[in-house]
Amino acid sequence: MTSHLRADWPHLLRWLRSPKGLFAGVLLVLTIPAVWHAGWSLVWPSLLAAMLTAAVCDVPLLRWRDGDWSVPDGALLTGWLIALVLSPHQPWHVAAAASIIGIGAKHALRVKRANVLNPAAAGVVATYFLFGSGQSWWGALPELPTPWIALLLATGAFMTWRLHKTALALSFLGVYYLIATALAFVDPAKVVALYRAPDVHMALFFAGFMATDPPTSPPRYGDQLKYGALAAVVSMVLYMTVGAVYFLLGGLLVANLWEGWRKWQHARQHRRPTAATPVTT
């Protein structure tokens, strides 16, 4: 038993230093005060249902895809995010359904072995249409006193820096609030909520932890600027026209599709046979 623990310890340390391990640690830092305020008895049904359902769904799909068994750490993070976004007052089966849909979307639509859609966003948006589910983004600490927003800013900035996605996050936030400020001169009552809790917390959490998802967002800085701007524009269009609670996640899914199309185009170009160069004498 001790020898197995010693053998696994380096692997655990490597995972903790990986993007997924760091992401789990950062989510834990945010989840602890959020649960402390909301109450464990309120949040645990949806939190456990989302995480366990995502893991159970992902394990056989990973086995089928990769030909080997593996720990569904990505699925656990997906379920965790879903639970932090959905209102904890929703029935636990709504969170479980969001996880099923999110994991299904992750495996169904792929380009170059990478999923196209952010699974947490896909699952949460789908449950809005299926169940009329509410979103409180309680994991972004909107109900805690204002100084707690510093923790959200610090953890989000750390993750964007660690993932090399700072350009994406700043592009989204810059365009998002630039449009909101411009609209304030036209209809201030319509956009004033975007500068208050919980909408400010939603935007910061979204930019730091969802828009920057490595498999579904571009790695190059130039593409990140376009991706973040597109997500911001579509989000604001949805907010002003539909006004639905999923406006940020809807903007993200459109940006996901753009990035997936860009990857598909790139892969298609590299698959085209090149004409043989004529030999001259």
Image (spheres, helix red, strand yellow):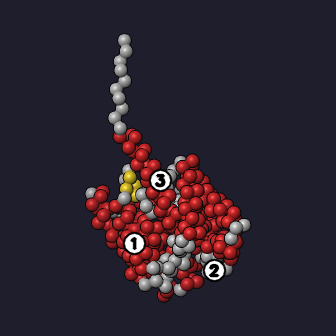
Instruction: Report how far apart the C-alphas of labels 3 and 2 lie in the structure.
Output: 35 Å
Q: Residue at x 39, y 81 (%)?
A: 93
Q: CA distance from mark 3 to mark 1?
A: 22 Å
Query: At which x and y percent is residue 183?
Result: 67, 66
In which quadrant will I find the N terminus? bottom left
Which amino acid lies under the numbered mark 1 shown in the image of this protein?
Ser
Amino acid type assigned to the residue bearing label 2 in the image = Leu
Residue at horizontal 45%, vertical 71%?
Answer: 125
Q: In the rendered image, is residue 162 in sight?
A: no
| Among the 4 quarters of the image, the one containing residue 12 | bottom left
Per the image, the residue denoted by label 1 is: 99
The numbered dot on residue 144 is 2
Dot 3 lies on which element? helix
Q: Which residue is mark 3?
A: 259
Looking at the image, tell me whether mark 3 or mark 2 is earlier in sequence order. Answer: 2
Residue nearest the observer in this picture, 58 or 195 = 195
Q: Are marks 3 and 2 in contact (CB under 8 Å)?
A: no
Q: Is residue 98 above or below residue 259?
A: below
**Image marks 1 and 2: residues in contact by CB distance under 8 Å:** no
Circle 3 packing at 10 Å, graded few (<14), some (14-19), many (20+), is: many
Location of residue 26 (image quadrant): bottom right
**Outermost residue, bottom side:** 41
> What residue sits 32% from the left and 62% below the top?
62
First along the sequence among labels 3 and 1: 1
Q: x and y percent of residue 138 in the render?
A: 55, 78
- Give the SS element for disc 1: helix
Task: State which tag comes first along the sequence, 1 or 2.
Answer: 1
Q: CA distance from mark 1 to mark 2?
A: 27 Å
* Amino acid of disc 3: Glu
Nearer to us: label 3 or label 1: 3
Mark 3 and mark 1 residues within 8 Å of each other at the beta carbon: no
Labels in figure, total? 3
